[in-house]
Image (cartoon, rainbow, N blue to C red):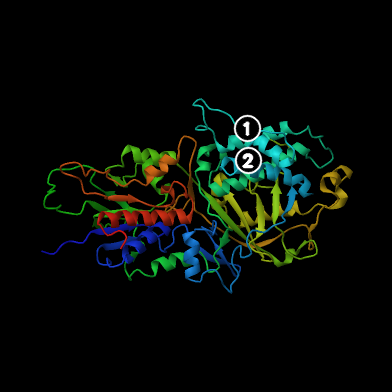
Amino acid sequence: MVVKKPRVVIIGAGMAGLTAANKLYTATGFKELFELCVVEGGTRIGGRINTSEFGGDRIEMGATWIHGIGDSPIHKIAQEINSLESEQPWECMDGFLDEPTTIAEGGFELQPSIVDPVMNLFKNLMDYAQGKLSLTEGSAKSEVDRYKLAAKASKISTSNGGYGKLSLGSFLRQGLDAYWVSVKEQEELKGYGNWSRKLLEEAIFAMNENTQRTYTSAGDLLTLDYSAESEYIMFPGEEITIAKGYLSIIEALASVLPPGLIQLGRKVTKIEWQPERHQGMDVANGYDSRPVKLHFCDGSVISADHVIITVSLGVLKAAIRDDSGMFSPPLPSFKAEAITRLGFGVVNKLFLQLNPTSGIKHGDVNRFPFLQMFFHQPESEYRLKKIPWWIRRTASLCPIYNNSSVLLSWFAGEEALELESLKDEEIISGASTTISSFLSYSNTEMNSSSHKLCNGNVNSVENSHGNEVKFSKVLKSQWGTDPLFLGSYSYVTVGSSGDDLDIMAEPLPKDSSSEPAALPPLQILFAGEATHRTHYSTTHGAYFSGLREANRLLQHYHCLGV
């Protein structure tokens, strides 16, 4: 009698799926243990990793950074495959640009003496929320002490005596309010366009909040759970990009797999599984068929003993919300409720090719600066109507590396979705109008009060070829409307918790080995960044989750550690 090999089907050829496939296939001495295949609904591998080119530079449409090189498995792979060096210029090849030029709506450049205190306040509030900063009683002998006390003053208790119902956005705003209380009342400086000192500080704080939205994918920080911030783990060391592109990591994982193991254009439409025993099962002598059946958009069907699902949380949410019948029978309530509670946001990148005729002069150098932009808040009557709403929560626009003519801006939430719906011409027009308005003022339009805030250094960024900054072409990511993703990455919402991330990782059906007639075990396993409690939203979180599920199967078949 020929013993049937267990068939493992992995849905999704992104970081989690290919890591699992790589591990299962390369487990020493057990390459013939499984009948293995990876099915991918799209026409490429990589998932939310998508390296591309724009303006002659290598760019990332999706995952961009190795978040801390210490202990990062992604960094280790990049080193092993010599992917950290390239002759072709690449995005952020010289790291994070420093010394930003900070300009407020209306064209007023701000000096560090105005910007830095609020920037430091925000950083310290985030460090406190993330458990990096411990507060002690005492007088505010220095500015840093004052920020710490402001953070402490923002602490409130909820009805259950803790932070369980507090959002990060609420915590941050309480910190800002406490900061204003903790310092002497600022003189309302008039004559600085339409800006008072307090309005400037609020706009600077809002810019930091908008940057945090892109970090977390939460469209509104009021939906982001405070307590989960301290559970999130960051790797030590610098953050870098990958010279040969993030896709080189994916290609390295896939390179060991034999031809045909990865099947592209195979979109799964239904997953049938067996959550309970039914008539006709023969537990003693095995089952007539494998317990899971995958139905594809072309009408074909594959049966499997084990399926590892690595689709995005956005796709799972849609399946639950729309009652699409993707799972038959539906997922149990504990799993569906975790999927519903967790957050999954949209973050998009916008690349703009600067027209050579724009001739931006930054100081004594003809290049575009790292531009930080502060906008009037929605309720302000001083908002320039010519600036489109979708660009008003954009924190910055900067070259992807020093002297590059390719500029990059990040969008989150509603603005990110709006960006996806706009035509290239609309984006170019809106960006050109906005940036031109920020760089068009001259010293003669400022009165003496303005110079008090600017320290006499106004308009150090000039357009040497007229007032209009022009762009020749654009490229944008569209993660929100792509049906294979429906968003970018996960976050923990108010009302959810890290426990839901653990629930996401639980296989189905639940362990029934103690029952006299157990169900086929490990029918559906879940991997992906949204299934990792401490590294969610990251590529290394997806990597760890793929290893976890591969090892779960290897342990089940008693071949772990070989």
Distance in Å between CA atoms under marks 1 and 2: 9 Å
Residue 40 placement, left or right of 170: left
Q: Locate residue 470: give its quadrant.
A: bottom right
Mark 1 element type: loop
Please provide percent x and percent y for residue 133.
61, 42
Can residue 382 be seen? no
* The N terminus: image quadrant: bottom left
Residue 356 placement, left or right of 535: right
Q: Are marks 1 and 2 in contact (CB under 8 Å)?
A: yes
Residue 229 placement, left or right of 172: left
Mark 2 element type: helix
Q: Locate residue 243: give its quadrant.
A: bottom right
Q: From the viewer's side, name the closer residue of 296 and 369.
A: 369
Please provide percent x and percent y for residue 126.
60, 43
Q: From the viewer's side, name the closer residue of 169 and 138.
A: 138
Please provide percent x and percent y for residue 369.
72, 59
Can residue 244 be seen? yes
The kind of residue tagged 1 is Ser
Query: Which mark is drawn over residue 154?
Result: 1
Please provide percent x and percent y for residue 145.
70, 39
Q: From the viewer's side, name the closer residue of 269 and 90.
A: 90
Q: Residue placed at 63% from the left, 40% from the top?
A: 125
The crowd level at tag 1 (other Cα within 10 Å; few <14, some 14-19, many 20+) is some
Pointer 2: what residue? 125
The image shows residue 216, relative to residue 91, as above or below, that is above
Q: Residue placed at 61% from the left, 65% from the top?
A: 93
The kind of residue tagged 2 is Leu
Q: Residue furthest top?
A: 159
